[in-house]
Amino acid sequence: MAAQQHILTIDDQANNADESKMDIKIETDKFGKTIKFMMFRGRHYLPAYSMSILEQTKTVSMRPDDIYFPAFPRTGTHWVYEMTNMLLRGKAETIQQYKGKHQLEFVANEGLSKLPSPRVINTHFRLSDAPWEVKEKKCKVIYNLRDPRDVAVSLYHAYIDLKVSECECSFEGFLYLFLEGKVEDGGLFDHWLAAEEFCKDNPDIPVYFHIYEETQKNLLLAVQRLSDFLGLPRNDELCQAIADKCQFSNMRKDKEKYAFKADGKNSLYRKGTVGDWKNYFTDNMLEDYYRVYEEKMAGSRFHKLYARNK
């Protein structure tokens, strides 16, 4: 794989992560095609983060009114981040920045400490890797769930569009890396299982599970439920305004200026649909997918949500 230089921007400002200080690993799929990752604590990540910032995430200072939001990539992170911030601010207005300004992987503790409360601290790290003070301060947690098949498709396109991963894989080749956990943070299934374990070990931490497909069916109800979890006085007029503002087509337009881009292309808002996986999975791929799903998720509280008969 030939080395290339790609420009990543956040809010139209260059995000200059020094690749020479990363532990770079090239994965090869079963067809001989490659994709580039950085390794951190034994797991794969997009090669876009500063190692010095990643090293300090466990010691980030949290506040009791912080909302902690650890979402696996492509599970509706930006969608829920936007809804949550609008509810906390009491305004159905687009957040005038990229969520990376509140993201553990991009902002050091010093920068996060300057942000006004209430903060929505987001990350793609596992819930089990949360800052120590999330438990100490008993911060509320929002955790996303989405059909893993749609996540695989969306993540594949994100790697293609972001370019820094230099992904040569077809979707089929990528899918098997996805099923092996050779994608972001060790893969979706282990991310879920870590969240489940965290909840068992910390029953006093309030955790809200936000389901992507339910939000697609009834966006207003999803905003109302989120408002209730945040402990806010129910304002149905505001919730309706937020639901309207957070329609996918509106968000895609409103957030263009604040998107995470590679070589000028917005990689964050693709389709926002349910069931796009049907355009990518063959029967054999689906069989292999469910074999791994059953192996990984059998016995999990999340198993039935996306089991084969659903």
Image (cartoon, rainbow, N blue to C red):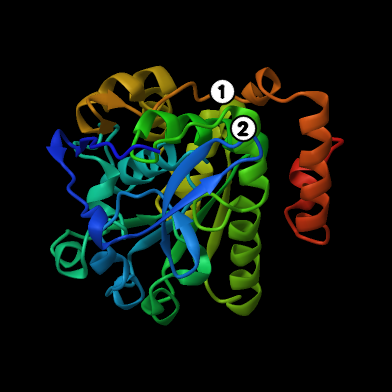
**Residue 79 at least partly seen:** yes
Q: State the SS at label 1.
A: loop
Q: Is residue 104 depicted above or below 259 in this figure?
A: below
Q: Residue at x 30, y 49 (%)?
A: 48
Q: Earlier in the sequence, mark 1 or mark 2?
A: 2
Q: Is residue 33 depicted above or below 81 in this figure?
A: above
Q: Are marks 1 and 2 in contact (CB under 8 Å)?
A: yes
On residue 150, the disc is 2
Camera-side residue: 10 or 199?
Answer: 10
**Residue 268 at least partly seen:** no
Q: State the SS at label 2.
A: helix
**Which of the 4 image quarters holds residue 191?**
bottom right
10 Å crowding of disc 1: few (<14), some (14-19), many (20+): few
* Quarter in which the C terminus is drawn: top right
On residue 273, the disc is 1
Give the left or right position of residue 237, taking residue 264 as reference: right
On residue 293, the disc is none
The amino acid type found where label 2 is placed reads Asp
- Where in the figure is residue 234, as x and y percent of width and height? 44, 44
The amino acid type found where label 1 is placed reads Thr
Q: Nearer the viewer, mark 1 or mark 2?
A: 2
Camera-side residue: 18 or 190?
Answer: 18
Q: Residue at x 40, y 23 (%)?
A: 244
**Which of the 4 image quarters holds residue 67?**
bottom left
- Where in the figure is residue 175, as x and y percent of width and height? 64, 37
10 Å crowding of disc 2: few (<14), some (14-19), many (20+): many
* Quarter in which the N terminus is drawn: top left
In the orientation shown, which residue stands out farthest toward the right?
309
Give the left or right position of residue 103, taking residue 69 as reference: left
Give the left or right position of residue 31, taking residue 111 as reference: right
Q: Is residue 173 depicted above or below 303 in this figure?
A: above
Q: Residue at x 45, y 64 (%)?
A: 140
